[in-house]
Image: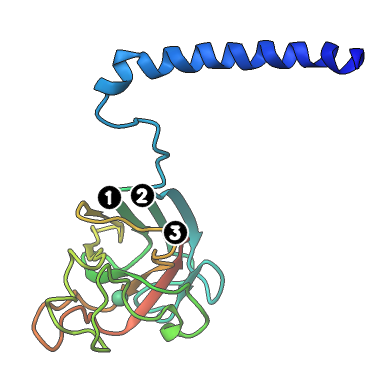
Amino acid sequence: MFAPRRTLLPVLVTLAAGAVLGGCAAQAPSLSAAPAPAAVPDSRFASSVAVDATFGTDGVAVTYDPALVPVGAQAKVTGETSGTSSVVTLAVTGLLPNRTYGAHAHQKPCGPAAADSGAHFQHTADPVKPSVDPAFANPVNEVWLDFTTDAEGAGSVTATQSEWAFTEQAAPRSVVIHALPTSTEPGKAGTAGDRAGCVSAEF
Ligand SMILES: [Cu+2]
C-alpha cells in the first residue's frame, strides 16, 4: 500500500501544474481577441527547375527538324512556381537568324517522336480535343513562348502566369519549339506548324 502512494504524488503534482497552465491559457485575453490561428501550414506548391541542354536526336533536348533546330543548338528552360504564379523562360542559341518560332509548354516529356510531348498544357482543360478554341487555347490558359531570334540565331522569352500556378499534380513536362508563330484564330488557335524541337523539363 505504501509503494503506490509514493508513485501517486508526482502524478498529482503534474496534474495540478497542468490545470494551472491550462487555466492561464484559457483566460488569456489575446486568445479570445485573435481572429484566427495563424499557424495553418502552407501547402501551396513551389518548384524551381533549370534545364540547360544541347539539341540532339535524343535526350533532354530533341530536334525533329534539324533545318529549323540544328543539332548542337542550345536551350535553357527555367520554371519558377511560387504557389500563386508560375514563370517559364526559354532561351536558345544556334537557331536560324531573324526568325520567329512558335513555342509552348506541353503536357508530356519529349520523346523520339515529335508527338510524344502530347498536347499543350492547359490550366482549364478544353473538353474538345484537339483544343483550337481561343477560349481555351490562349496565352492566359496555356504557356506560350513564341520568340524571334536575333542575327546570331539567339532568342529568349518569358511567360508569366499570374492568375494560376502549376501544382504537383498539374504541371507541364516540356517546351516544344514549332516551325511557325502561334495562331490565335478560332479553329486554329494554339497551332504553330510542325514541331521542330523539344526540351524536357519537370516544372
Ligand atoms: Cu506547342
Which one is in front, 2 or 7? 2
Q: How many marks?
A: 3
Q: Check disc 1 and give the amino acid type.
A: Ser
Q: Give the quarter of the figure containing the N terminus.
A: top right
Is the residue marked by circle 1 packed among few (<14), some (14-19), or many (20+) residues within 10 Å? Answer: some
Q: Give the quarter of the figure containing the C terminus.
A: bottom left
Q: Is residue 203 above or below residue 40?
A: below
State which mark lies toward you, 3 or 1: 3
Which one is in front, 43 or 74? 43
Sequence-wise, which precedes: disc 2 or disc 3?
A: 2
Picture coordinates of residue 187, whole percent (x, y): 13, 89
Q: Is mark 2 within 8 Å of ligand 1?
A: no
Numbered tag placed on residue 81 in the rendering: 2
Numbered tag placed on residue 168 in the rendering: 3
Q: Check disc 2 and give the amino acid type.
A: Thr
Q: Secondary structure at mark 1?
A: loop
Is the residue marked by circle 3 packed among few (<14), some (14-19), or many (20+) residues within 10 Å? Answer: few
Picture coordinates of residue 28, whole percent (x, y): 35, 14
* Colour theme: rainbow
Does 136 sit left or right of 66 as displayed?
Answer: left
Numbered tag placed on residue 85 in the rendering: 1
| Residue ID at (48%, 72%) | 109
| Residue ID at (42%, 68%) | 174
Dots 2 and 1: beta carbons under 8 Å? yes
Q: Check disc 3 and give the amino acid type.
A: Glu
